[in-house]
Image (cartoon, helix red, strand yellow):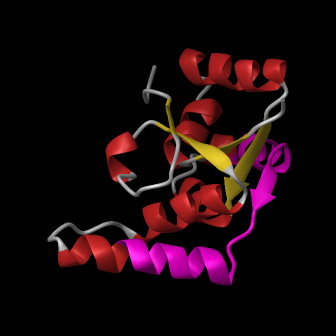
Amino acid sequence: MMAHVLFDTSVLIDLLRRRPKAVDGLRDVQRIGDVPFVCAVSIEEVTRGLRSVEHSDAIELFEGLRLAPLGLAEGRLAGFWRRSFARRGRTLHQADCLIGAAAIGVGARLATGNPKDFPMKGIEIDHWPPGE
């Protein structure tokens, strides 16, 4: 059965840098027929840090992924998480909350190198260790 996976910024960077574990992970996603997604927040974060030689590769990568929308439901969920965790003394980053909400919005597991950034209930984490 086909499933969805949303790549966060850390995974996208590793794919752009052709790090073996990320490349193998993408091949596995393709082999089993899962649908890879990205959201606008990760596109912005990756684009902001691009090396000049990576621009065309980044465009090709982004265009090969489906775009997970960020709408009203995702914005509300991200805000709920930030408020709830802040009340308990933990600050979550807006970007991480929006990425997590985008994953939930399309029913995707979240492929990330930073699982600690996504402690929110309901997100299924697929840990892709960074830089390997």
Location of residue 71 in the rendering, given as x and y in whole percent from the top left corner: 69, 79
Location of residue 9 in the rendering, given as x and y in whole percent from the top left corner: 54, 48
Is 71 located above or below residue 35 in the figure? below
Q: Is residue 64 magenta?
A: yes
The boundaries of the magenta stretch are: 55-81
Is 44 located above or below residue 59 in the figure? below
Q: Is residue 72 magenta?
A: yes
Residue at 35% x, 51% y is: 117
Is 7 located above or below residue 88 in the figure? above
Q: State the image quarter where residue 104 is shown.
A: bottom right
The majority secondary structure of the magenta stretch comes to helix
Location of residue 53 in the rendering, given as x and y in whole percent from the top left corner: 66, 41
Location of residue 127 in the rendering, given as x and y in whole percent from the top left corner: 47, 31
Query: Toward the viewer: 31 or 123?
Result: 123
Is 88 located above or below residue 7 in the figure? below
Query: Toward the viewer: 83 or 8?
Result: 83
